Amino acid sequence: MPADSRAALKHLISALALGDGFQFHIVVSQSPRQIRQLLATLAEAVPARRGGSLRSEHLAPYDILPRDAPLDGAALAALVTTHLDAFPAPAAAERLVFALDATFTGEADIPAWRLLFRRMNEQRNALARRLDAALLLCLSPRLEAAFAQEAPDFWSLRGVSITMEAETTAADASPALQAPTVERMPANMEAGDEAAGRELAREVDRARQRTLAHPDELGTQRALLIWLNRLGDHLALRGHTNEALTAYREALAITEHLAHAEPERADYQREISVSYDKLGELMAALGQGEAARDFFQKALAIAERLARAEPERTDHQRDLSVSYNKLGDLMAALGQGEAARDFFEKDLAISERLARAEPERADYQRDLSVSYEKLGNLMAKLGQGEAARDFFQKSLAIRERLVRAEPERADYQRDLSVSYEKLGNLMAALGQGEAARGFFQRSLAIFERLAHAEPERADYQRDLSVSYIKLGDL
């Protein structure tokens, strides 16, 4: 599973463990098997976090409705409604998940799903009141765009979105997504990446054609936006920055159009800030610091406006802290230490406030540990060793608590090893070799465990080799 998907899965587990009642999350996959595996993972991970138990229903209409003809929209809507109405209330200490599986979708079935999505949009408030459970909508990539187009209000309720890595098993893949046609992608892509890129490019082209045919429908614009951002992310992750830049700029133009059409929609404003952030990250990767700063500052201005308008919205506060973080990272990279410190301190103030308000939220505690670490990195870079040690130790204390609470979490273990490594680096720079050795040995012990548990993880192997080098250099 790619790193961003693993991170989204952790957020989903946290959301289900910490929340009760109705939630809405999206999983993008082309494989019913992946959905079954995901539900099995949730059944173990969520009770481990919150206690009690997790019970799920996996509704796959393709296992129930006739398959000798395209899905009938009315029959599909009736089936889903019947199952939702019959879904029970949770027992004591029980978390419920209702997974609607639309991953195995042929082209001929899409109109039926579109009809269901429109009805879901019309009944979103009633459904949210009635369903005392988390709704997991499991969609093929093509249906994700259709859902955003047909159910824009329901779409805005989404919490976590996970995109699963495509499987290569032909029997489990959607027939609508096989036999790709050839479209031009960057020449240095590997075969698997090239196939995925061509598929994304085709979806962008289809969405663009629908937008040209229906220029006044905001839903088609939103669908095109989703595919452009996905294509841009795919290209940027593989270092194809110029092609990614083209996709992100087109996505930005669409978000600005949507926001202009409905200026009261906070989610459209947020999408503009996301587009600015993506462009800022690309400019930073290209070494264009001033352009990156311009985009990040535009994103920050939106985040500040949204946070002022609804100060009780913790998601807006968290977005604001992310904006401060991005500008802090950029200023540090440009050698503007004081400006970086100002942004990092603003980020820290928000992180401390959120962690204080909801101390049981592990994600807020982790955010706070990152904020301390960022300031520690900056102080070390500025030669302020004592201040750096103070921030690193505060970050370490949080990470040790998180590991004690959930020792099975590999991401927490890795965070802890990084904290030990940071303190080891600092002690070595301050001439305290024995203290440095102690921290490096603790870091190494964790990396050895992680690499042994998941030997196929190249990042763990790389971390392990760096730990050996650091100890060897002392």
Image (cartoon, rainbow, N blue to C red):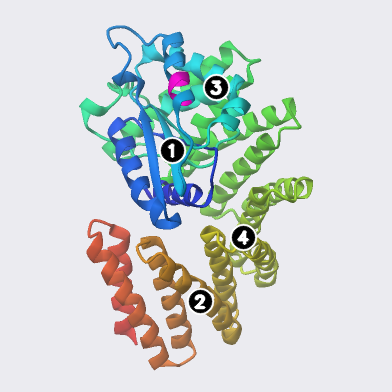
Q: In this rendering, would 398 be left or right of 439? A: right
Three-letter code, disc 2: Ala
Q: Nearer the viewer, residue 271 or 297?
A: 271
Residue underneath mark 4: 358
Q: State left or right for residue 183 relative to residue 90.
A: left
Q: Is residue 292 left or right of residue 113?
A: right
Q: Looking at numbered disc 1 in the image, what kind of residue is underneath it?
A: Val
Residue type, mark 4 in image: Glu
| Front disc: 2 or 1 | 1
Q: Position of residue 39 (x, y in %)?
A: 35, 40
Residue type at mark 3: give it: Met
Q: Is residue 406 above or below residue 52?
A: below
| Quarter holding residue 217 | top right
> Tag on residue 97?
1
The number of numbered badges drawn on the structure is: 4
Taking the spot 78% from the left edge, 49% from the top edge, the residue there is 308
Q: Measure the alpha-carbon separation of dots 4 and 2.
A: 18 Å
Q: Which residues are magenta?
A: 80-84
Question: Which is in the foreground here, disc 3 or disc 2?
Answer: 3
Residue 289 image-quadrant placement: bottom right
Residue 139, given in percent of the width and then of the height, sits at 42, 28
Determine the residue located farthest toward the front in the rendered image: 92
